[in-house]
Image (cartoon, helix red, strand yellow):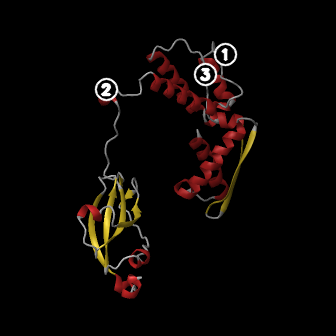
Amino acid sequence: MTFALMQHCAAMFERKTRCPGILDSKKAVSKLQTACESAFKTLSRASTATIMCDGVYEGMDLNVSISRPRLEMLCSSSIKEARAFITDFCSSNDVVDVDVVLAAGNVCEMPAIKSLISSLFPNVNNRGNASIAVDEAVVIGCAMHASWMMQNGMHKVQNPKSCYAPPVSEDVTQLCPFDLSVAYDNVGESSSSSDKNSSSLFSAVSLVEMGAPLPAHAVKTIDLSAAATSTSCSALMLRQINVGAGDAASNMTAVDLARIGITEEQRSK
């Protein structure tokens, strides 16, 4: 329905400005779609609405007035398709007794849609709680249904093959399976490998967090002066820590403290 209104506005704009191709511009289509969606909200409560877009295409403005009967005429084909879809769904699924009908969305506030629902479900008088918005009622109902399923042990899928699994695309973004961090270790001290992974490990700096999209680029500044001045070592070893993957550690490179401006006198203090 929104696209039908967009086509009408584009036709009126091209007729007035003699400038075709407004629907070929992505920027113009985005502006026009937002304005048309706002017009649906207005026409659900008022008889007329004005669709305005400043500089929508080639620096020209769009200003189209539309009435509710005109909008219903533009959306008549969509309304007929909706009627046919609901009728076929109810007949194919043997839907006979309907207790509550909730119509959510700006389009459902139009008189044509309300009359459509009344004609399809004439015996249903329950339209929901008036104190709760329809959109919120749908969300609350889904949450309550999910809670009921979990309490009754129905949240587990009995047949995984029955679930729809979208095909894997080559463009799917891969995520980092663990928290990738870098830590500095004392090279000068003679200790076992187990001690180096525990007691002699000074600090860790997170580079790539778990779940970050790959490939990832991270730049972090590591302050080695505090650790270097607290020991008499001549170099520090950078270690890669994969948190979440067994906390595996691997040596990366040794940093000569003299090359980063830390003298032997400072290290002995």
Q: Residues within 10 Å of mark 2 (few under 14, many from 20)?
A: few
Specify the quadrant that holds the C terminus: bottom left
The residue to which callout 2 is attached is 159
Q: Is residue 80 left or right of residue 150?
A: right
Q: Amino acid at mark 2?
A: Asn
| Mark-to-mark CA distance, 3 and 2 | 31 Å
The residue to which callout 1 is attached is 125
From what the image shows, is residue 101 above or below residue 140? above
Residue 10, horizontal then vertical, whole percent: 61, 50
Q: Residues within 10 Å of mark 1 (few under 14, many from 20)?
A: few
The residue to which callout 3 is attached is 101
Tag count: 3
Q: Amino acid at mark 3?
A: Val
Residue 251, horizontal then vertical, whole percent: 26, 68
State the residue in front, 227 or 3.
227
Residue 20, horizontal then vertical, whole percent: 57, 57
State the residue in front, 246 or 124.
246
* Residue at 60% from the left image edge and 46% from the top image edge: 6
Quadrant of res 214 = bottom left
Q: Amino acid at mark 1?
A: Asn
Residue 91, horizontal then vertical, whole percent: 47, 16
- Picture disc at residue 210: none
**SS for tag 1?**
loop
From what the image shows, is residue 79 above or below residue 256? above
